[in-house]
Amino acid sequence: MEITEDNKGKRVLLLGNEAITRGALEAGVDVATTYPGTPSSEIADTFSKIAQEATKQDKDPGFYFEYSVNEKVALEIAAAASFCGLRALTCMKHVGLNVASDAFMTYMYVGCKGGHIIVSADDPYCHSSQNEQDNRYFAIFGGAPMLEPTTPQEAKEMTRIGFDISEQLELPILLRTTTRLNHARGPTVFNALQKPRRKGHFEKNPLLVTVPSTARAKHPVLLQHLDDAEKISEKSPFNEIITIGKPGDIGIVASGVGFDYAKEVAEDMHLNVRILKLGMTHPIPRKMCEKFIDSCETIIVVEELEPILEQQFKTFAHDIGSDVKIIGKSTGHFSRLYEYTPDIVAAAFSKFFKTKNPYPQPFESKLKLPSRPPSLCPGCPHRSTYYAVKKAAPKDTIYPTDIGCYTLGKAPPLEIADLLLCMGSNAGTACGLAVSTDQKIVSFMGDSTFFHSGIPPIIDAVHHNHDVVITILDNRTTAMTGHQPNPGTDIDGMGRPAKRLNVEDVVKGLGVEHIEIVNPDNLKETTAAFKRAIDFKGPAVVVSKSPCILLEVQRKRKAGENIAIYEIDQSKCKQCKTCIGRFGCPALYFADDKSIHIDVTQCNGCGICTQICPFSAISKKGGKK
């Protein structure tokens, strides 16, 4: 693979996520762990591809990689490797750090031995997330040195150099990225690959056991390390001043992709400014910032999400008695909401500088285009499970759901998602609803979510005898983030055979007495199973087992098997709209004359539509490769 070439000076176009993987390889990473989550997924997926390719060739990839059961476990495994003197990387999306935070906060007290990079991929605008929290606060909260790259090239370099900084400070480094950086492509210049250390040695130290006396002893050490980190920040090449035009007394402060936009817009508007680019933002280089404040009459702060830099600069200005004017979110020039773009920055700059916006205003069409929200794939087994539940459950049933493809059941016509907080919350909120209302409760989670954080609330349901139906949609993969393996699959992230855990066996071991195992391809039996589960008094679990349709189609194509084609007999079709109005398969559509047809280019040949048509108007036509 090109990304593994030991070719110093080679220039390659890489995703920001791929560049992070490359940076870790150049630093000689020994252990990489993750729970997959967009926008961070490709970091780990690249490690996995490298490892699987090496496994196929019976070679050693040089590192150990795993898709851990959740982010907390991923961080703990990597931390243990660091305690043995190995270099480790853990990557996750921003909300994943919430899951890992219990370990993260104490880990900062005890510190690390081998370098450890913790990647938090934030998601402004919630492209694929349930919130847009700003994880820069975690660096301040936990006392973690933090780096924020602006380009894929810098992401690679910050990862590579970050390992050295981590070992120098004996602290893990938080590498904070955002969606736009993770999924942007940019030219990346390779450095030489460093050889991994492979095996370390754990040296026993009573200060690694965090009893209260240890914490009291280690907290002052953490603060001293942060003082040392600030000295590194003052000299860091990632913090620099960029001059545009003939600068006067107006300065711009920016970090992350905000810097890219600020620089681009300032150049296009022919402004005369200096930009303080902050790449190591915690600890912030205070002396450098104070000097910058002293040289300016006005400072514009460009940062997505929370006004963290803005507030710090206001504090610094107050402390040194400066009357510098600081422009940002507090002045209404920028929003705390969503993802920034060059257009947003240009609008703010043109307002402040009272100059013409150089960018053409977005074209607004008078035509109202229909929205195209994401939907469950044609043939997705979750759709037939949901359809069966809606047939079996009383009208006022509550449907707590979870993070995954199945969240798309929220959309019409299924509308089978009423409550969602976070990974694993479906079963926990189901238990809470059971003690709060007499309505029936049927919750949903995927197999990967079950292993991630769905087991403890099922234990709670069993122990307290909550009257709930908990559905586990076992499609044998982690589908939404890219079909990564989980404990319910028979291979691991390195492509090696792995022990497969059956969901129903685990559920039985938790003490659940009423367990239904169904194949959602059979609607009649699935509906009957849900009726039995709903009628049962106490906790019941339905395991709906059917592979992700995308993997199943892929398997059939590789095996040369036919994928069935279905058609609608227009003489039998009464246009009752059950197939579209209640089932909602995207492969079904209305023609101009209001007749209903199947789009064979979308149909994946599941055949569930033949079971739901009350007039038997749909039948198999033949097959296609």
Image (tube, grey):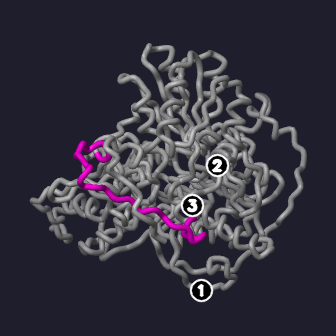
Circle 3 packing at 10 Å, graded few (<14), some (14-19), many (20+), is some
Q: Residue furthest left?
A: 366
Give the mark nearest the N terminus, 2 or 1. 1
- Relative placement, left or right, of 121 versus 499 is left
Amino acid at the residue labelled 3: Glu
Amino acid at the residue labelled 1: Lys
Quadrant assignment, res 204 = top right
Task: State the residue position of label 3.
Answer: 234
Regarding residue 316, the answer to whether it shows in the image is no
Task: State the residue position of label 2.
Answer: 226
Can you tell which of label 3 and label 1 is closer to the viewer? 1
Amino acid at the residue labelled 2: Leu
> Does dot 3 land on a helix, a strand or a loop?
helix
Quadrant assignment, res 536 = top right
> Does dot 2 land on a helix, a strand or a loop?
helix
The residue that appears at 29% across and 47% down in the rendered structure is 580
The residue that appears at 30% across and 48% down in the rendered structure is 335
Name the spot of residue 462 as percent of width and height, x first: 65, 21
Circle 1 packing at 10 Å, graded few (<14), some (14-19), many (20+), is some
Q: Residue 573: within the magenta?
A: yes
Task: State the residue position of label 1.
Answer: 10
Q: Residue 133: within the magenta?
A: no
Nearer the observer, 136 or 543? 543
Give the mark nearest the N terminus, 3 or 2. 2
